[in-house]
Amino acid sequence: MTMTQDATLAPPVNRRHGTSEEPYGVRRPDLAEAREALRRLYGADTATVWADLMRRSGLSGTESDPASLAKLIDAMAASDPILALCARSLRIRQAAHTHLSAARQLIIDAV
């Protein structure tokens, strides 16, 4: 297993297990991705739906931490069935990223 790191101080890359931010190629979902999903669902009404979700979740929309995404997901889950389904998808991806990150770290620590 060869670990490499470039001169820009990017996270270490393990060719088999990905980066620490993208274990096994799975990126942690964020607010920008959630908004893009809404745009694909709601089109021209996205701004209205997004503003309502920001108000209900107490977010500004510029946050980048997992806790903020969790707040948005909770607000979406308590909404109409389409938003609830989108929330479920984001929650599954967030959990997958968390578990894959932990598994990746266990493997690295074991080596």
Image (cartoon, grey):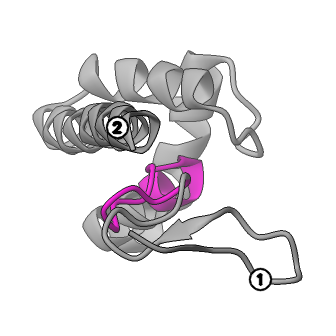
Q: Secondary structure at mark 1?
A: loop
Point out the stretch of residues depicted in magenta: 21-35
Q: Residue at x 57, y 58 (%)?
A: 32
Residue depth check, mark 2 versus mark 1: number of the one nearer the observer: 1
Q: Is residue 60 above or below residue 62?
A: above
Specify which label sits upstream in the sequence, 2 or 1. Answer: 1
Residue 81, percent from left and from top: 11, 33
Looking at the image, which residue sits at the far bottom?
7
Left or right placement of residue 64 versus residue 83 in this view: right
Q: Residues within 10 Å of mark 1 (few under 14, many from 20)?
A: few
Q: Secondary structure at mark 2?
A: helix
Q: Indicate the quadrant containing the N terminus: top left, top right, bottom left or bottom right.
A: bottom left
Residue 68, percent from left and from top: 61, 26
Q: Main secondary structure of the magenta part?
A: loop
Query: From mark 2 to mark 1, how far is it between C-alphas?
Result: 28 Å
| Magenta span includes 29 | yes
Choose top left, top right, bottom left or bottom right for residue 86. Answer: top left
The amino acid at mark 1 is: Asp
Q: Residue at x 29, y 42 (%)?
A: 100
Mark 2 sits on what residue?
A: 94
Residue 82, percent from left and from top: 15, 43
The amino acid at mark 2 is: Gln
